[in-house]
Image (spheres, rainbow, N blue to C red):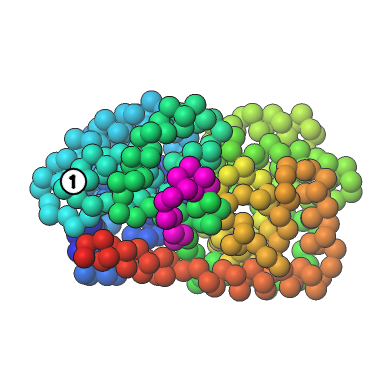
Amino acid sequence: MKILMLNYEFPPIGGGAGHAHRCLLGEYSRNKNLHVDVLTSGCGPGLVKEDFADNIRIYKVGIHKKNLHYWRKLEVVEWLFKARRLYFRLLGENAYDLSHAFFAFPTGWLCYKTANQLPYILSLRGSDVPGYNVRLGLDYKLMAGLFRRIWSGASLVAANSRGLSELAKQFMPDLDIPVIPNGVDMNGYHPRSSTLPGRPINLLSVGRLISRKRIDWLIEAVGLAVREGLDIRLNIVGDGNLLAELQKKAADMNVSNRVVFMGLVERRQMPEVYRANDIFVMASQHEGMSNAMLEAVASGLPVVTTACEGAQELIGDNGIIVNYPDSRGFAAAIKTITSDTEKYKAMSNAGRRIAEKFSWSAVADRYIQYYERVVR
């Protein structure tokens, strides 16, 4: 089976969708019955071809990227314009069985244009679902008709969490949108052997420094928690367009010594970063299914999060969901988790059991089953 996959972001560009795509390709590389070409973006000029594996080749279309982890609308248009030519060339040179697009737009638009000659499936990731990203509110309204045509033309539209599927069904209620979640490397991410954390309590946040992640709220919560007597430190892994603004906020709140901006951390070092911290925190307004939260859960970290998409699958007895951005609720959740040694241990163990339900091999098998169904 020969597949053309499209994703306008791929490491080092982008965030969770690119990471998930790379993990999925890792599983595909072990399936010699698959041949996969990937059309994505690159940082330098021109076209770069990379062999991910013997059966996987990646085509990176160079664009003028200002920030690796933040997409400007002009950059999306540039990628779409440049990728379009290569997309049609690849279709002319190869006998693909189907195409698989991460994101319904912009990538899904290319598949939609050739639906009469090649079936396609869509993986909804977040920002391609109306209502997900606040800053795209006007864009969603203007492009609603196009989105409906792209979704309707697909042989399959899948979401990576129940919450994202429910949000998508609000936009197209009659469309069947199954859930194919993200996975996690259970061998790479595993708990440390520890009891109740020492002092200070190390909180970990992992993600792009963009408005949707609401890191500013986490900083406010740290300030309040410290004033209420909690000895905590917030370690933030990630980069983005709001770095300087967030650093200033920490300084203005006199918690610069309690908030550590670690910047980008290499993927191979992340398991140790999780094990070096005590509690994972996330205040996102929306998520698809957070890769970082899934990795934290597999690492045995109790979680404090807002009620974003993906939380209902990943958070049970292993964490606390704060139903709306409430700094006092955040501080109370930290106190609850760290006030009892047995409670902390139980939460850690519960998280590991939840993570065991997710694996990239299972995700790959689900997609391949759909591929075969579409081709038949």
Horizontal relation, residue 288 to residue 81: left or right: right
Question: Which residue is painted at 36% across and 45% down in the image?
Answer: 151
Q: Secondary structure at mark 1?
A: loop
x, y (%) of residue 312?
62, 59
Report the side of 283 relative to 32 (left or right).
right
Return the x and y of residue 193 as percentages of the image width and height. 68, 73
Q: Quadrant of residue 145?
A: top left
Residue lying at 77% horizontally and 43% vertically, measured from the top left: 326
Q: Residue at x 84, y 68 (%)?
A: 340
**Where the C terminus falls, by quadrant?**
bottom left
Residue at the extreme front of the image, as rendered = 174
Q: Is residue 51 above or below residue 14?
A: below
Percent x, y of residue 208: 54, 42
Q: Is 1 one of the magenta-colored residues? A: no
- Camera-nearest residue between 24 and 219: 24
Q: Residue 126, image x and y in percent?
A: 48, 45
Seen from the viewer's position, the closer of residues 241 and 83 is 83
Q: Which residues are magenta?
A: 167-180
* Magenta stretch, overall SS: loop
- The residue carrying mark 1 is 116
Q: Residue at x 48, y 42 (%)?
A: 171
Task: Indicate whether residue 177 is drawn in magenta.
Answer: yes
Q: From this viewpoint, which residue is outermost toward the left?
A: 93
Given residues 81 and 276, the one toward you in this image is 81
